[in-house]
Amino acid sequence: MPETIRRFLDACRENKALNTMITVNEAGLRQEYAAQKSRKGLLSGKLIIIKDNINVKGLPCSCGSRFLKDYIAPYDAHVIERIREAGGLIAGKANMDEFAMGSSTEYSAFGPTLNPVNPEHVPGGSSGGSAAAVAAGLSDYALGSDTGGSIRQPASFCGVVGLKPTYGRVSRYGLTAFASSLDQIGPLTRTVRQSAELLQVIAGKDARDATSSDIPVDDYLSALERDEVQSIGVPFHLLQEGLDPEVKVRFDETVALLKKQGKQVLDVSLPHLKYSIAVYYILATAEASSNLARFDGIRYGARQSREAESINEFYSQNREYGFGAEVKRRIMLGTYVLSSGYYDAYYARAQKVRRLIHDDFQKAFREADVLLLPTCPVLPFKLGEHVDDPLAMYLSDIFTVSVNIAGIPGISVPAGSSDTGLPVGVQILGNLYQEGRILQLGQTLESLR
Amino acid sequence: MDWDIVIGLEVHVQLNTKTKAFCACKVSYGDPPNTHVCPVCLGYPGSLPVLNRAVVDSAIKLGLATHCRIREYNTFARKNYFYPDLPKGYQISQYKDPICYEGYVDIAVRGEQKRIGLTRIHIEEDAGKSMHGEDGTLVDLNRCGTPLLEIVSEPDIHAPEEAYTYLNTLKQIVRYTGISDCNMEEGSMRCDANISIKPKGRKALGTRTELKNMNSFRNVERALKYEAERQRKVLESGAAVTQQTLLWDEQSNQTKAMRSKEDSHDYRYFPEPDLSPLRIDDAWIGRIRSSLPELPDARKKRFTELYGLTEEDAALLSSEKEIADYFENSLQTFNNPRLTGNWVKNEILRILSESGKSAAESPVTPAALAGLLQFLHNNTITPQTAKTVLDEMAATGKAAADIIRDKGLEQISDSSELESLIETILKENPAECERYRGGETKLLAFFIGQVMRGTKGKADQTLTRKILEKKLG
């Protein structure tokens, strides 16, 4: 057996308690290796861990849900095809909050993932399994999906690098949808360079995703060598309150480091960002309520009872059994905001505010090359701390969700640790399709630590 | 009291594009269940729709043919509801911004032209089919994702008969554009109706009911008649019409209420995030416009003006594009519109209906018909012979000239040959001669019949008549 595979399988066993993986592709990996051996590519021989909402033909694709516990994907997602073409091997499927709804990976039907840095704490979510697997050393490369911070926040909590690309940069074909207008697949890696490599492989137009862009893909590896960023915008008005003091210290430190590098730090204003949580939880739940309607138990997935009195009771029984509390909560929210008579007050209004948030960012990018924010206002919380207070968990998404709402790219890179050793991350945001620029500044920050 | 009837129709037309609206599966009918399906039309997790641009072509085509405005920026919407034959839990449709809007269709009602407004035409995808049996329900998803156009009329229809005519006219237009075959039995054309009545002359509309489950244009008309009458009785009894959806029951010829639960959908429409907005520019519209055929109204008008056909013949010959094409193709070879028109209308349509074929696949080609009619026109054969020859042409595919030559069917126009035959016939029928001479002149037809029998229909009729009149006179 090749050394890399043996090491990965050993690491999986050693870290079993962290519960990072739902499926280890133990049987398939050797075949993958044999098939990929001769391929020369950017990911040649590298093991890639895949979040369990991205379809890999022949492997389970549970999305962290009891509903899809036994569902085997019948086709490969676009990103999986790309990874294989670049010589990468599919290592297995990582744990996640059910249907990517959550910020702690506690809402998984397969049990919570623990943070490798401190197992009493959550790894963040929803791509917590991917982030924790990279942090624990199972592999240096993982894919996650980010709808409101689900790549960047767990990267920050686990002390790794996580990048959410521009909406449309990576094909969503084969990503089980949560909120279609916000979802993007992106890399979680140990280093910024590895993120650049993985993004290089998965980015680009795919005819099967009508929202994927045909704008030419940048050469991210050579972008790492460029030095394009002169000015960095910081919305200081957002950092006045609600920020954990230790997060604030690490963030200020980062700003100081960048100034020392000769970067110009500007105060920018994002006046509508304060509405982003409200906008997000209207748009995302509305889309989710529709996207998850297909999980009815007719063709696949949980099928509870054959004794239902009516078709609606049949659906109810399957969905009652198959979905967890957070998913049900969001389906109900989304159904409500789309209901006749409420559409204008909620959905239509949220769309308008979405535009304003987008415009805020566009204005800020006219003043500064990139923006800098903490990834998350709080330190990784303890398991169970927020489970009964979903609103507190929603509010901790404040710095990440606005990025999805505006469709722009963002990268979270480690910015040191708290006094108790918990990781803190900072987030660099670029304008549309400027992944190269934020990768480059991310690498600068990485090199300064 | 006199009542006004107000009717609006919603027609679904299934498009005959090669592939489905949002995936590459084949559009099919009658194939084994679930053989034209893929992750996209099955709604498997992670699959995404991609718009088939041929569907947009079809929508623009019909929009132009019905004088609609074509929308430049189009969005799609999700229509959400749960049903076993709807795998995604929503239909991709259009809601606020239909691709075509503000159009009209002119129909002929009791000899007068009437304009029926079209509110909108929009694109949507079809659901699958549920087959309910004793042991449960089976689902066939071959139809799922098949493109549909929904055509919504303004409430401009004021009688069930007008609804019938409107549907026929619309079907004619759709078939001319070639985007659908509009077969109601196969479900490629479906119609729901809204109807209300109000005291004559009053402006405000009455409470409407929605009628579904009519499987033919006649049944639409019948259901509307029944429902108008039912509403009249309800209102005249002092009660109120309940807004509800009714199903037409063909067996009992009645409308019946659906269970109210099935009627209480809140579709939660919202913009489809998986499809980017679709821009239709002038070049696209121009390309479609130039591909549009001449439409039935214009063609009919041209048939009367250019060929001197009667209104009725022109309407019949232009009713189907294939028939009109057949007629005009035949004129290319032999330009005698009235003669050709008569033969297409009477004989070719008969042959087509007997053989179950369309005009485009007619066993007698337009040129072959023209060949036959030339022989008829220059008196080589008689009309009766021509019919026999045509039947043989249909059966064997041979040319008229060959059949006439091989069977010696040329018309007998030699007066001496006819005279001697007539002499014999008169001798054999002395009693009839007597009666004729006694004033029973309608017996002429009998003598002509005898001549035709003796010549196997080949005798020149005009000449025969002339000789008979002379000899009997």
Image (cartoon, rainbow, N blue to C red):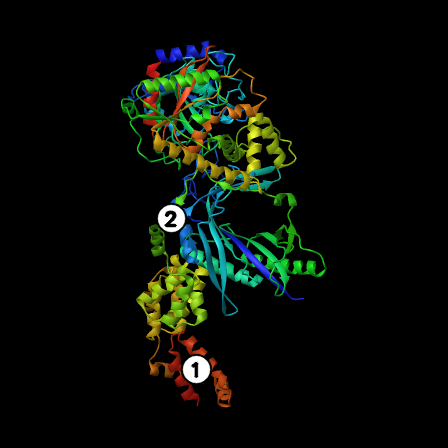
Q: Nearer the viewer, residue B87 or A167?
A: A167
Q: Which mark is residue B425?
A: 1
Q: Nearer the viewer, residue B95 or B251?
A: B95
Q: Which chain contains the residue that carries disc 2?
A: B
Residue occupying image coordinates x 40% and y 35%? A209
Q: Which residue is mark 2?
A: B280
Q: Is residue A116 left or right of residue B291?
A: right
Q: Which chain contains the residue that carries disc 1?
A: B
Residue occupying image coordinates x 58% and y 33%? A332
Specify the quadrant of the image occupied by residue A225: top left
Secondary structure found at label 2: loop
Q: Is residue B408 above or below residue A162?
A: below
Residue A173 is situated, as x and y percent measured from the top left of the image, at: 41, 32
Is residue A8 visible to us here?
yes
Q: Nearer the viewer, residue B452 or B65?
A: B65
Is residue A34 visible to us here?
no
Q: Amino acid at mark 2?
A: Ile
**Where, quadrant-wise, is the C terminus of chain B in this rendering?**
bottom left
**First reached walking from the N terminus: tag 2 or tag 1:** 2
Local crowd at mark 1 within 10 Å, few (<14), some, or many (≥20)?
Answer: some
Secondary structure found at label 1: helix
Residue A190 is situated, as x and y percent measured from the top left of the image, at: 38, 16
Q: Is residue B400 left or right of residue B472?
A: left
Residue A344 is situated, as x and y percent measured from the top left of the image, at: 54, 42
Specify the quadrant of the image occupied by residue A318: top right
* Tag 2 near tag 1, CB within 8 Å: no
Please tell me whether mark 2 or mark 1 is closer to you in this view.
2
Residue B75 is situated, as x and y percent measured from the top left of the image, at: 44, 44
Marks 2, 1 in one chain: yes
Q: CA distance from mark 2 to mark 1?
A: 77 Å
Local crowd at mark 2 within 10 Å, few (<14), some, or many (≥20)?
Answer: some
**Where, quadrant-wise, is the N terminus of chain B in this rendering?**
bottom right
